[in-house]
Amino acid sequence: MQEAGIQSSTQNSGAEAIIRAEKIEKYYAQPSQNRVQVISPTDLKIVPGEILALLGPSGSGKSTMLRMLTGLSRPSAGQVFWHEKPIADAEINVSIVFQSFALFPWLTVLENVEAPLQARGVAPEERHTRSMRMLDTVGLDGFESAYPKELSGGMKQRVGFARALVVEPEVLFMDEPFSALDVLTAENLRSELLELWANRTMPTKAVFLVTHNIEEAVLLADRIIVLGRNPGHIRTDFRVQLAQPRDRKSEPFTQLVDYIYKVLTKPDVAPAEAPDQQPRVRDQRQMKYQMLPHARPGGVAGLLELLLDKGGRDDIYRMADDLAFEIDDLLPIVDAAQLLGFLKIEEGDAAITETGTQFANSEILRQKELFRDAALQNVLLLRQIRRALEAKSDHTVPEEFFLDLLDEQFSEEEGRRQMETAITWGRYAELFDFDAARRRFVMPDALEEGVAADGGNV
Ligand code: ADP
Ligand code: MG
C-alpha cells in the first residue's frame, strides 16, 4: 500500500497541479444517430507559475476543454481535479475572460467589475475599493460610470480583464480574449497582461489561454499544447523557453511559429520535437565570441550544394525530412552556413546568398579561399588566432592563450568544444595549422618552412 502511494506521487513529480484532468472526454448525443465525440480521452495539468496556451484550429474543442477544466461543463467520461479534489466537490477559484467580453450591458463599468465580488458576498465598501483599484490597474480610471456600449472593443475587454482579476483568481482562463480586437489594441492588451503577470501585480498562479493564433501563443506562453480535431486530442505539448519580452522577428521565434504551423497544417503527420530554442548566432551580438555551431566545413558545403540544387531556397524542416536528418543535426550546419554569410533564414526557409552560391559552384581550392574570407570576416576567434600568428616573429601561438579568453565566456567544456570547432574550420580554410602534440597554432607557411629547414638539417 505504502509503496503504491509513493509510486504514484513520483509519477506526478514536478510542481503540484492546480487543475488536473484525467482521461476527460466529451461527446454529444445526436437525435438520429450515434453520439458525436468532441474530445477524445485527454490528460492535462495546469501547474503554478506558467502561462499555458491551448492552440488549435477552430472546432478542435478548445472551448469545450476550457469549459470542462473550469467546471462549467462536466466531462462525459474521466475526471477533473482541483488540487487533487474532484472539481465538483472543491471550492475552485478561477475566472474566465471571453472573446465576446460578456459584459452586462445594463450595468456600469464599475458595477460590471463589482458583480463577481457581489456574487461572492464581498461587502459593498470592500467591493468598491477593490474594483476601483482594479479599474486603475487596467487603465480604466475615469470610466467607472460609463456603460459598455459607450466603450471601444479594447476598453470593453479591459473591463473583462478587470472583472476577471478583481476576484484574484488562482487560475485565469481566457478564451480567445484578443480575437475580437484590432491588431494594435490586441498587441497593447497582450503586453499589459504580460506586465501584470511578470510584475506579480496579480496574485494569479497560472494562466490558461485558448487561442487559434500561433504568434499569440508563442508571444505569451511558457507552454503550448496543440490540439487536433475530429475528435479533439493533444498533438504536441512543449515548453517555450524564449526570454520575455519576445521578439517576433528573432530566429528562434520564427522557427517556433514555423514548427507549430507545420504541426497544424499536417494533421496526419506525427509532430516532430519542438525546435531547440537556444539563442542562435544572431542573438548573441552582445557576446564577444559568437557561439560556433559544431559543424564541419564539409557539412556546410554539402548543405549549400543541396540548397542550390533546390533552386537556392528551401524549408529547413522539409530539407531535414528529405535528408532523413534529425532537425537537431541539421540546425548546426544551417547555423554555421548562416554565421559565415552563406545563407540567410527567412520565414523558416534557408535562402542561399550570393557568396553561398559562389561557394557551392566552386572547386575545392576556391571553396577553401571563400571559406577563409568568410571565416576571417565573421568569426572573431579565427580572426584573433590569425592576427596573433601574423604578429609573432616565430608565427606560432599556444592554444592555451585563446582557451583562457574563451573561458571568460563559456564553461571550460564548451570553451574546449569551441576551440575544436575553430581548429577544424581554421585548418580547412588553411588559416593556420595546429600542432596537436605541442597544442600550438602554427602559420601554414611557417610550418612548411620549418619542415623544409628540418629536412635541410637531416
Ligand atoms: P473550438 O473552441 O476549438 O473552436 P469548440 O470546443 O467550440 O471548438 O467545439 C468543438 C466541437 O464540438 C465543434 O465541432 C462543435 O461543433 C462541437 N460542439 C460544441 N458544442 C456542442 C453541442 N452542444 N452539441 C454538439 N456539438 C457541439
Ligand atoms: Mg472556441
Image (cartoon, rainbow, N blue to C red):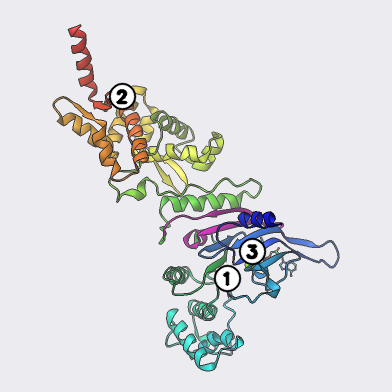
Specify the quarter for ligand 1.
Answer: bottom right
Nearest the eye: 258 or 149: 258
Q: Quick check: 212 left or right of 310?
A: right
Task: Please name the residue that numbered disc 2 is placed on.
Answer: 436
Quadrant housing the N terminus: bottom right
Q: Residue at x 64, y 64 (%)?
A: 20
Secondary structure, mark 1, is strand
Q: Is residue 124 above or below residue 97?
A: below
Q: Describe the element under mark 2 as helix, strand or loop.
A: loop
The answer to whether residue 232 shows anywhere in this view is: no
Residue 406: assigned label: none
Within 10 Å of disc 2 (Cα), the crowding (few <14, some 14-19, many 20+) is: few
Picture coordinates of residue 233, whole percent (x, y): 67, 56
Kindly identify the amino acid type of the residue bearing the numbered disc 1: Phe
On screen, residue 26 versus residue 260, left or right, reads right
Separation (CA) of disc 1 from disc 2? 60 Å
Q: Which residue is mark 1?
A: 173
Q: Residue furthest left?
A: 393
